[in-house]
Image: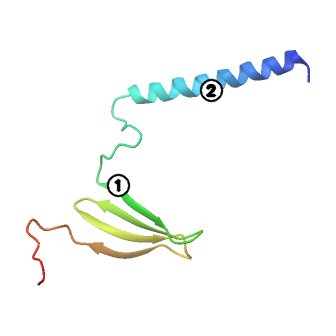
Amino acid sequence: MTSANLLMALLALLGVVGLILLARRAALLLPGLPAAGSRTGPLRLEQALALDARRRLLLVHCGERRVLLLTGGAQDVVVGWLDPPTENPEVPR
């Protein structure tokens, strides 16, 4: 590989990286698109726990409730729905 070919490859790489950064900036300026990592909308991931190499336990906020999901096995499973917290929980004595 000659130095001219190496310089051409480096310039092409810099051009592609520049286009990616420019496209990201343009996407952030478009109206109606949520920003990356924003927590708007009725569905969002609250926590994730890796149980092993394949399976994960996910706590997903869905509207006003939360659901516990087990994913990665032969099939995904809804473990259960969690009730929303009450304003004045009774403390067992």
Residue 67, by quadrant, is bottom left
User: Looking at the picture, which amino acid does disc 2 mark?
Assistant: Val
Q: Name the spot of residue 74 as percent of width and height, x first.
A: 56, 76
Tell me, for residue 16, which label it has, or none. none
Which residue: 38% across, 28% down?
30
Secondary structure of residue under mark 2: helix
* Furthest residue toward right: 1
Image side of residue 45 versus residue 23, left or right:
left
**Is 63 drawn above or below residue 53 in the view shown?**
above
Q: Name the spot of residue 48 as percent of width and height, x first.
A: 43, 62
**Is 88 drawn above or below residue 11 in the view shown?**
below
* Furthest residue toward front: 93
Image side of residue 30 versus residue 51, left or right:
left
Residue 15, by quadrant, is top right
Q: Which residue is mark 2?
A: 17
**Is 49 drawn above or below residue 20 in the view shown?**
below
Which residue: 65% across, 25% down?
16
Figure quadrant of the N terminus: top right
Dot 2 or dot 1: first in sequence order is: 2
Q: Which residue is mark 1?
A: 44
Which residue: 78% across, 23% down?
9
